[in-house]
Image (cartoon, rainbow, N blue to C red):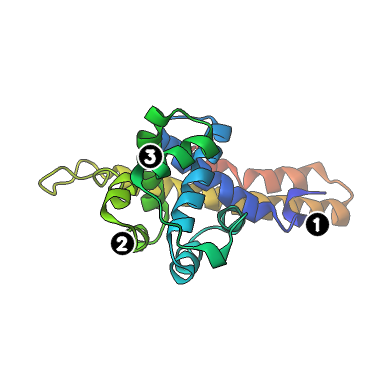
């Protein structure tokens, strides 16, 4: 099955893009670790929210991560009320990390989610938490700004632009493969036609 004919390919690509951004915020390229921490973060936040607040937050997530968010959810039992220590214990157990690593890991996920979600969405969800848990889940200072509100160089904007470029490159790749398949069927694998389809991607390669 070719990539462009896979109905789940776009959803998978988007989920991997989110994992990459969150992994960058965590300071790791280990996708398994990133996913474990993200899943624990999602489940712990989810179970502390009301059904309505959880639904509102999950609407911001990409399709595959929305499935992760709701995996094992029992709406009749939420919101679960647990202390700061209970929250740390839960995340440590589900993510299989040390308790001492939970707080920086949670902060890292929150920083990545703040960048990925619509503006204000994370703050809206965290507003439902008690003060001690809100502090645990709160991200660090906004990237690209110092304490006085001055710009440091637009790091967040640059990463957002790069993700958009990567998305466009992926879309052009799918179009190119589709064109190549059509050209192959119509022209009997004419090498010049296939090379022309591949050349569509050349201007994009310098952006990687």
Q: Residue at x 44, y 67 (%)?
A: 50
Number of labels in the image equals 3
x then y, percent, for residue 164: 47, 52
Q: Secondary structure at mark 1?
A: helix
CA gap between label 2 and label 3 equals 18 Å
x then y, percent, for residue 202: 58, 41
Whether residues under marks 2 and 1 lie with C-beta atoms below 8 angstroms apart, the answer is: no
Q: Is residue 8 left or right of residue 120?
A: right
Residue 62 in view in this figure? yes
Q: Is residue 118 left or right of residue 61?
A: left
Q: Is residue 19 left or right of residue 71?
A: left
Residue 158 in view in this figure? no
Q: Residue at x 89, y 49 (%)?
A: 188
Along the line of sight, the residue nearer the viewer: 69 or 76: 76
Whether residues under marks 3 and 1 lie with C-beta atoms below 8 angstroms apart, the answer is: no
The label nearer to you, 2 versus 1, is 2
Along the line of sight, the residue nearer the viewer: 52 or 90: 90
Q: Is residue 41 above or below residue 50?
A: above
- Neighbours of disc 3 within 10 Å: few (<14), some (14-19), many (20+): many
Q: Earlier in the sequence, mark 2 or mark 3?
A: 3
The residue pinned by badge 1 equals: 182
- Neighbours of disc 2 within 10 Å: few (<14), some (14-19), many (20+): few
The residue pinned by badge 2 equals: 127
* Residue at far left of view: 148
Q: Residue at x 60, y 59 (%)?
A: 63
The label nearer to you, 2 versus 3, is 2
The residue pinned by badge 3 equals: 108
The label nearer to you, 3 versus 1, is 3
Q: Secondary structure at mark 2?
A: loop
- Neighbours of disc 1 within 10 Å: few (<14), some (14-19), many (20+): some
x then y, percent, for residue 109: 41, 43
Q: Earlier in the sequence, mark 3 or mark 1?
A: 3
């Amino acid at each position: 099955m070719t990539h462009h004919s896979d109905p789940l390919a776009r959803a998978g690509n988007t989920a991997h893009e989110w994992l990459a951004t969150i992994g960058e915020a965590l300071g790791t390229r280990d996708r398994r670790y990133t996913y474990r921490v993200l899943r624990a973060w999602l489940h712990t936040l989810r179970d502390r929210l009301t059904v309505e607040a959880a639904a509102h937050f999950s609407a911001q997530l990409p399709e595959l991560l929305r499935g992760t968010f709701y995996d094992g959810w029992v709406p009749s039992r939420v919101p679960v009320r647990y202390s700061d220590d209970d929250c740390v214990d839960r995340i440590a157990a589900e993510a299989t990390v040390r308790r001492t690593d939970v707080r920086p890991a949670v902060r890292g996920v929150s920083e990545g989610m703040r960048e990925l979600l619509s503006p204000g969405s994370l703050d809206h969800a965290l507003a439902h938490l008690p003060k001690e848990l809100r502090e645990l889940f709160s991200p660090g200072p906004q990237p690209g700004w110092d304490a006085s509100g001055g710009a440091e160089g637009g790091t967040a904007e640059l990463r957002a632009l790069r993700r958009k470029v990567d998305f466009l490159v992926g879309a052009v790749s799918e179009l190119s493969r589709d064109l190549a398949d059509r050209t192959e069927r119509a022209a009997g694998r004419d090498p010049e036609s296939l090379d022309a389809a591949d050349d569509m991607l050349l201007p994009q390669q310098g952006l990687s």
